[in-house]
Image (cartoon, rainbow, N blue to C red):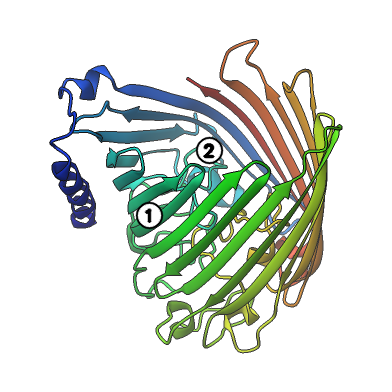
């Protein structure tokens, strides 16, 4: 792992050496022009189950995320890092069964370096190597807990024209939201795989499964006016090869109503060497001898004065003989509910429920000069393996800049009803409440 990090950093140093003749400035600039910021997070999560066979679970955590980035030398060389620490403040429940381990695992505290990278940047190119946050549709920060996910990776970002970016990424290992370091696994591996402390994961693979080999990814994004478009290719090595496109357009009408439309499409397949197939791993209760997934979606909506309303639909085709009967393989979002499908809810979506279709209606409105935002949504899932279910969602976001700049209060609440094959524990309704207070400085 350390060797891979050293290779990524050495690549950046080589790029810097080629530009040493540029306006380099003083090495004192690394410190005098550096920047430090951070965030404090106090999260209180409650899982409430209607079945008496499963006890309610809770977790409270106070976390601090500190980010540092140096100034630049040698025409674009800089360094960055982030350290995160979290503590339950003595509120840990008496058993793991009563603990929401998705927040920070089963421990009372944790701390880890989530970023430690070297960066080289010029006007049209950026290279970053080492531990870092990524922001791509199917491989990102999953930042709905006290600590984000991060990756040991090498990233190239080209900007040939304004508003047009081209990316090339190679990840070697990753750190989940509850892990203490980088590991050669993903969310399909069991908790504590090779000493990891990964919780809130899918965990379907056996403990004897071979290590993950990371990911190759390439993508491009473009945005101008009301148009936003992106296309990505992911090779989740020995798991799935994915092609994904997404595009949207917002019409400006000069009235309080500005409608918008969006579409997305996804295809996945695998080669002969696939860890999920080779280990006969069941996803949504079904094993398979290959990976095959096809999905598409559409969304239509409009801005209305200081709010918006939209309707979305996704379809994930069934595929006989494939892992999960055509389940969408997403090594870094499954069970996190952070994938980019239009109909994904706070608790889960089609990635977790399996092949079928879903629709979702969502409305949000801003009050008091955008200080208060209210969101409500309803999603319905009809799936081949996990039956029919629906989720009701409410979200209250209050920006308290008038009290203290950077302070935000948020409460997210969702209730899931229905489903089969233990989609919710005991096939009974499940309510999840997430109270979050954050302060950015």
Residue 399 seen anywhere in this rendered image of the structure: yes
Q: Where residue 341 appears, x then y in whole percent? A: 66, 58
In depth, the one of 224 and 34 nearer the eye is 224
| Number of the label disc, if any, that sits on residue 329 | none
Q: Which residue is tagged 1?
A: 174
The residue shown at (43%, 69%) is 235
Looking at the image, residue 324 lies above or below residue 226:
below
Res 351 quadrant in image: bottom right
Looking at the image, residue 384 lies above or below residue 182:
below
Looking at the image, residue 436 lies above or below residue 4:
above
In depth, the one of 325 and 230 nearer the eye is 230
The residue shown at (78%, 49%) is 415
Q: Nearer the viewer, mark 1 or mark 2?
A: 1
Does residue 390 appear left or right of residue 188 in this picture?
Answer: right
| Mark 1: secondary structure | strand
Does residue 396 appear left or right of residue 215 in this picture?
Answer: right
Q: Label 1 neighbourhood size at 10 Å, few (<14), some (14-19), many (20+)?
A: many
Q: Which residue is tagged 2?
A: 92
- The CA distance from mark 1 to mark 2 is 26 Å
Q: Earlier in the sequence, mark 1 or mark 2?
A: 2
Q: Label 2 neighbourhood size at 10 Å, few (<14), some (14-19), many (20+)?
A: many
> Across the whole image, how many numbered discs are drawn on residues?
2
Does residue 118 appear left or right of residue 165 in this picture?
Answer: left
Q: Quadrant of the N terminus?
A: bottom left
Q: Where residue 120 appears, x then y in whole percent? A: 27, 40
In depth, the one of 36 and 175 nearer the eye is 36
The residue shown at (54%, 60%) is 231
Q: Where residue 32 appears, x then y in whole percent? A: 24, 17
């Amino acid at each position: 792992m350390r060797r891979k990090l050293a290779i990524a950093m050495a690549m950046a140093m080589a790029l810097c050496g080629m530009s040493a003749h540029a306006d380099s400035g003083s090495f004192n600039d690394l410190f005098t022009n550096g920047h430090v910021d951070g965030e404090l997070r106090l999260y209180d999560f409650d899982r409430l189950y209607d079945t008496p066979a499963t006890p309610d679970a809770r977790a409270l955590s106070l976390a601090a995320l500190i980010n540092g980035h140096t100034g630049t030398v040698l025409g674009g060389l800089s360094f960055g890092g982030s350290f995160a620490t979290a503590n339950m403040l003595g509120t840990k429940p008496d058993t793991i069964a009563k603990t929401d381990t998705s927040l920070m695992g089963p421990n009372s505290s944790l701390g880890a370096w989530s970023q430690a990278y070297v960066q080289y940047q010029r006007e049209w190119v950026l290279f970053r190597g080492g531990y870092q946050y990524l922001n791509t549709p199917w491989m990102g920060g999953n930042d709905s807990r006290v600590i984000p996910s991060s990756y040991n990776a090498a990233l190239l970002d080209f900007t040939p024209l304004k508003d047009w970016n081209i990316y090339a990424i190679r990840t070697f290992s990753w750190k989940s939201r509850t892990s203490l370091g980088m590991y050669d696994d993903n969310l399909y591996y069991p908790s504590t795989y090779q000493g990891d402390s990964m919780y809130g994961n899918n965990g379907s693979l056996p403990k004897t499964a071979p290590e993950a080999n990371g990911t190759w990814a390439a993508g491009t994004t473009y945005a101008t006016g009301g148009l936003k478009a992106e296309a990505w290719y992911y090779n989740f090595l020995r798991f799935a090869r994915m092609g994904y496109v997404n595009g949207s357009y917002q019409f400006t009408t000069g009235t309080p109503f500005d409608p918008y439309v969006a579409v997305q499409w996804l295809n996945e397949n695998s080669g002969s060497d696939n860890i999920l197939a080779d280990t006969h791993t069941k996803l949504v209760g079904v094993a398979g001898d290959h990976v095959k997934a096809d999905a598409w979606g559409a969304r239509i909506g409009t801005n209305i004065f200081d709010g918006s309303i939209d309707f979305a639909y996704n379809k994930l085709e069934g595929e006989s003989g494939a892992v999960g009967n055509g389940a969408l393989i997403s090594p870094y979002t499954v069970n996190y509910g952070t994938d980019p499908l239009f109909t994904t809810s706070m608790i889960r979506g089609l990635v977790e429920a399996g092949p079928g279709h879903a629709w979702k209606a969502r409305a949000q409105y801003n009050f008091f000069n955008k200080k208060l935002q209210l969101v409500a949504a309803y999603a319905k899932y009809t799936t081949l393996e996990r039956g029919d279910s629906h989720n009701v969602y409410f979200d209250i976001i209050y920006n308290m800049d008038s009290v203290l700049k950077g302070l935000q209060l948020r409460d997210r609440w969702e209730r899931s009803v229905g489903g089969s094959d233990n989609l919710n524990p005991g096939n009974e309704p499940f309510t999840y409440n997430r109270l979050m207070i954050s302060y950015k400085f």
